[in-house]
Amino acid sequence: MRNKAFNPNRPGPPALPSEALALVAACRALYDAIDRLDAEASASVDLWRSDLRALNLLERGPVKAKQLATALGLTAGGVTALIDRLEARGLARREDDPDDRRGTVVAPTPRMFQSLGPLYRGVAERIAALAQRYGPSEAARATVHVRDVVEAYAAALAPSRDTLDTVVPERSPSLRRRRGVQLRR
């Protein structure tokens, strides 16, 4: 069944089958839930939401400051200020870069995991419980579906990007200003 309420002269969703509209609505609800969880997490450690993105990258282990700047679309000064904020809250620390004597590596601290771990661990445990309830085959299919949704979001952001771990400088306001890049609107 198609969405007959769609009017091409009025902004709104395209005419889609009801099951597609239900999937889009579920994705929006998921995004909203993640957004609220991240707002709670950043507030719990008195950081900006953008700083939480840095902590998400550090969760995997130490990251070179230059890589952090690139991933977050920050200038050298911007990443320095970010690292200062994270260090002031005891969530990260600077280390010498073993590959570049002038470089810096940013490493997570145990406090980062102690502060944010319980909130995110609770979500992971609930998702793991769902996977057990689904069974291996259905959980594997659900994983594929979620990855497909991630790819859809990534493609909407930048059709040429292969992963969410790279940066599109043309979409970063600070890099656009620095490079003089203009985005078509």
Image (cartoon, rainbow, N blue to C red):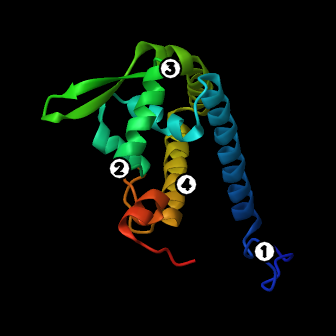
Q: Quadrant of residue 153?
A: bottom right
Whether residue 133 is visible here, answered yes or no, is: no
Q: CA distance from mark 1 to mark 3?
A: 52 Å
Q: CA distance from mark 4 to mark 1?
A: 21 Å
Q: Earlier in the sequence, mark 2 or mark 4?
A: 2
Could you say whether the residue bearing mark 1 is in a helix, strand or loop? loop
Give the residue displayed 42% in from the left and 52% down from the top.
73
Q: Residue furthest right?
A: 5
Q: Earlier in the sequence, mark 3 or mark 2?
A: 2
Q: CA distance from mark 1 to mark 2?
A: 43 Å
**Residue labelled with disc 3:** 89
Could you say whether the residue bearing mark 3 is in a helix, strand or loop? loop
Q: Nearer the viewer, mark 3 or mark 4?
A: 3
Q: Earlier in the sequence, mark 1 or mark 3?
A: 1
What amino acid is at disc 2?
A: Thr
What amino acid is at disc 1?
A: Arg
Give the residue displayed 50% in from the left and 34% down from the top.
136
Instruction: In the rendered view, tell whether residue 28 sits above or below residue 97.
Output: below
What number is the disc on residue 2?
1
Q: Position of residue 84 (x, y in %)?
A: 43, 29
Q: Position of residue 93 (x, y in %)?
A: 36, 22
What amino acid is at disc 3?
A: Arg
Image quarter where the C terminus lies is bottom right
Image quarter where the N terminus lies is bottom right
Q: Position of residue 172 (x, y in %)?
A: 46, 59
